[in-house]
Image: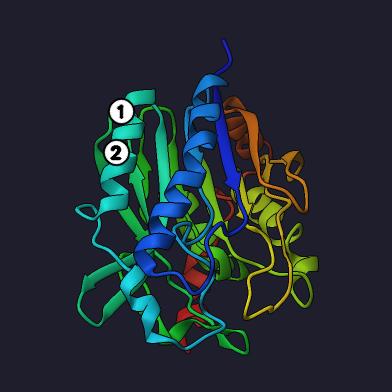
Amino acid sequence: MARIVKSGLIQLSSKVDTNASCEEHREGMIKAHIPYIEEAAKKGVQILCFEEIFTGPYFCPSQDTKWYNLAEEIPNGPTTQIMMEYAKKYNMVIVVPIYEKEMDGVYYNTAAVIDADGKYLGKYRKNHIPQVKGFWEKFFFKPGNLGYPVFNTAYAKIGVYICYDRHFPEGARALGLNGAEIVYNPSATVAGLSEYLWKIEQPAHAVANGYYVGAINRVGTEAPWDIGEFYGTSYFVNPRGQIIAEGSRDKDELVIADLDMDMIKEVRDLWQFYRDRRPETYGRLVDL
């Protein structure tokens, strides 16, 4: 019998006025996600992932210290604790991307991973941090320091690779070597310069590593920054590089796909990229 995992991605627009407090943003966005969590449960979703920093707007076009107040501890902060309750209630693995506070002045772009019994399994901290016009992320986030962990959940071995990370094949390969069967890439990406890469890089990671990728993007525009349109089109891609489910460009949506885990072995046995790797020749990749 085939081993099928039903997974879901939630893409939403911002629901709270930018001038609101960070607490109002957190409460408003959690409230907005709850109907989609419940819909996912009704449809039998076993693993669910939200978009990058889902509890607020994408505030990195600014350099406003106000947004430091959106950061919270993991797992003891309010958002992780709430999602632990929902994971247990619905027997659902939930990937929770939020702004993490390790201590005052030390903040990360992070995703917590909660198992289907409601237990916190661990977290991934975004490793690659951009600093370009409209994306002043180094002002807000330290680079991740936890490597590329893979979490052995009730349904599959999963990894997380956040937004800008997707431009770097090295971490995507590390996740595969660490055993990932599904990699989630929660993002906040706008139309324009990098849009053409949205459906190139992640299918390429899926093919090169023989795993599934769930790519999540928010939707709409966010005043007052107006850096462009967050164009949605969240999708799942299989280990052959084929997009098997895709969201719309401009509306809130739950995207669901049935992932055939047997395809992973089939594709890896066919292409044998892991067998034919030559790591002893790759020193130049880490010499510079």
- Dot 2 falls on a residue whose secondary structure is helix
**Distance from the alpha carbon under mark 2 to that under mark 1:** 6 Å
Quarter in which the N terminus is drawn = top right
Q: Residue pushed farthest top?
A: 1
Residue that label 1 marks: 88
Horizontal side of 64 relative to 115 (left or right) equals: right
Check contact, mark 2 vs mark 1: CB within 8 A: yes
> Residue 98: which disc?
none
How many tags in the picture? 2
How many neighbours does mark 1 have within 10 angstroms: few (below 14), some (14-19), or many (20 or more)?
some
**Residue type of the residue flagged with mark 1:** Lys
How many neighbours does mark 2 have within 10 angstroms: few (below 14), some (14-19), or many (20 or more)?
many
State whether residue 147 appears in this view.
no
Q: Position of residue 44 (x, y in %)?
A: 53, 20
Q: Position of residue 165 (x, y in %)?
A: 54, 68
Q: Considering only vertical position in the picture, is 14 above or below 83?
A: below
Residue occupying image coordinates x 75% and y 66%: 197
Residue that label 2 marks: 84
Q: Position of residue 80 (x, y in %)?
A: 30, 49
Horizontal side of 28 relative to 272 (left or right) equals: left
State whether residue 37 appears in this view.
yes
Horizontal side of 264 relative to 20 (left or right) equals: right
Residue 119 falls in image quadrant = top left
- Dot 1 falls on a residue whose secondary structure is helix
Q: Nearer the viewer, residue 102 or 275?
A: 102
Residue occupying image coordinates x 22% and y 70%: 102
Q: Considering only vertical position in the picture, is 238 above or below 216?
A: above
Q: Considering only vertical position in the picture, is 93 above or below 141?
A: above
**Residue type of the residue flagged with mark 2:** Met
Q: Nearer the viewer, residue 236 or 241?
A: 236
Residue occupying image coordinates x 48% and y 81%: 137
Q: Nearer the viewer, residue 200 or 86?
A: 86
